[in-house]
Image (tube, rainbow, N blue to C red):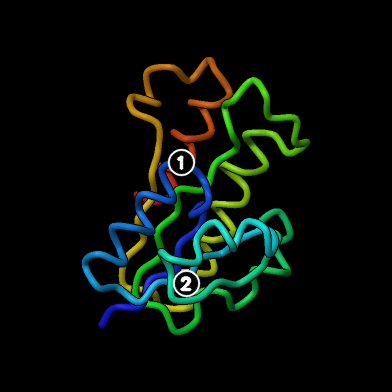
Amino acid sequence: MNKVILFGGTGNLGKKIAEELKYVGYETTAIVRNEAKAAKLKNAVNSYVIADVTNRISLHGICNGFDIVISSLGKSVSPNDKSKPSFTNIDLNANSDILNEAVKSGVKKFVYISAFHAENYQHLEYFNVHHQFSEKVIQ
């Protein structure tokens, strides 16, 4: 059985990914910010790890033992989102740190959920950072 580590699993898309992974039988671990976030996924994942994705040190070794990394991690685009990290902090920097950990751990597959046609809207920070990170994944 493939072991999957899922970043961004508590977001709208991430929850659907977690549910689908469970449905097809993957052993899934979600990375969450806190216990309250973990509770939202209790029926969709096998386990969870609390980590601060904006802190590179908290990600050290996080991908060890996993076959697949899936990242739907991204800063919310909701106008109600009052969190401090920027699109660059989450969508580019945190995902880059996760990718680096996946490479170090020898993960077989890295799946990243980007923004559709991000390359066409690089004048907007949200799309620009998605495009930049997609380029890193390709490299």
CB-based contact (under 8 Å), mark 2 and mark 1 = no
Q: Earlier in the sequence, mark 2 or mark 1?
A: 1
Q: Position of residue 97 (x, y in %)?
A: 59, 59
Can you tell which quarter of the image residue 90 is in? top right
Judged left or right of residue 22, residue 40 is right
- Please give left or right for residue 82 compared with residue 65 in the image: right
For the residues labelled 2 and 1, the Cα–Cα distance comes to 17 Å
Asked which secondary structure carries label 2, the reply is strand
Q: Give the residue displayed 55% in from the left and 53% down from the top.
A: 96
Residue that mark 1 sits on:
12
Number of numbered discs present? 2
Q: Which residue type does callout 1 highlight?
A: Asn
Residue 71 placed where, x, y %?
45, 54
Q: Residue placed at 38% from the left, 71% from the top?
A: 4
In the foreground, 98 or 23: 23
Q: Residue shown at 35%/53% (left/top)?
A: 17
Looking at the image, residue 67 sits to the left or right of residue 61; the answer is left
Residue matched to label 2: 29
Q: Position of residue 16 (x, y in %)?
A: 36, 49
Residue 52, compared with residue 73, is above or below; it is: below
Look at label 2 and name its amino acid.
Answer: Thr
Residue 33 appears left or right of 91: right
> Of 68 and 119, which appears nearest the observer?
68
Q: Is residue 124 above or below residue 84?
A: above
